Amino acid sequence: MLNTIISVVMQGILFLIIPVVWYVLFNKKKEGFWRWVGVFKVKGEKWIRPSIITFITGIVIMVLPLILFEKIGLVTKEMFYMEGISDRGLNVELIVIILLRAVIQTAFLEEVLFRGFIGKRVSSKFGFITGNIVQSIIFGIPHGLPFILVYKNYIVGITLIIGAAAVGALQFWLNEKKADGSIIPSFTIHSIMNILSFMCKSLGVSL
């Protein structure tokens, strides 16, 4: 538990330091930091249906290729092993660890950095399409690069990069076009996907 808390804090500092420094140096509107990166309540309900569609699409894009790759032997469960979570079953302590890692360490911090900071800043300078492409590519690369560098598995690595980038692009579109710039919809989707993934790992479910 302590190691997880330390990891969450360290990653929080790493992911937030650049946005915070940028905000202090260049934010001229004097709006609060969290609203500046999109952390605010969404008005209305026009974002709910697109969020459900985006969530289902994201599951299909990210999960189906992995199931196929496992069937043909390109990936194994060991490649997705997570120390402290995989094959441990579920108990109160592990549920807290999963929530910290799935919701705060990955979903929240990644949404703030990629959709809330990078996407918004690039979009404000070069337009929505450019901002979306840039943030989605930067978001996608870490999801597949380990398979290329560690396992030399280029097919899986490139597929995961493209898949994660596509999901990231959908989430940025959802935030900016359907939720008035709030990152709450993509954060919610990201959190649920992560929780499901981490719980599967803890229960020993394949991938």
Image (spheres, helix red, strand yellow):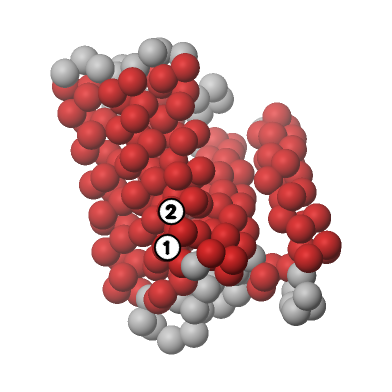
Q: Is 6 or 185 nearer to us in this picture?
A: 185
Q: Position of residue 37 (x, y in %)?
A: 64, 65
Can residue 200 be seen from the camera position used here? no
Amino acid marked by disc 2? Ile
Foreground residue among 24 and 38: 24
- In the picture of the structure, the residue carrying the numbered disc 2 is 133
| Residue 169, position as x, y percentages in the image | 39, 56
Residue 124 drawn at (x, y percent)? 58, 69
Residue at point 83%, 63% (across, down) = 24
Give the Cα separation between the discs numbered 2 and 1. 6 Å
Q: Is residue 202 left or right of residue 2?
A: left
Q: Where residue 129 is drawn, which disc sits there?
A: 1
Q: Label for residue 37?
A: none
Q: Quadrant of the N terminus?
A: top right
Q: Is residue 127 visible?
A: yes
Above or below, 86 relative to 15? above
**Quadrant of the image occupied by residue 64:** top left
Q: Are marks 2 and 1 in contact (CB under 8 Å)?
A: yes
Q: What is the secondary structure assignment of the residue under circle 1?
A: helix
In the rendered image, which quarter is residue 160 located in?
A: top left
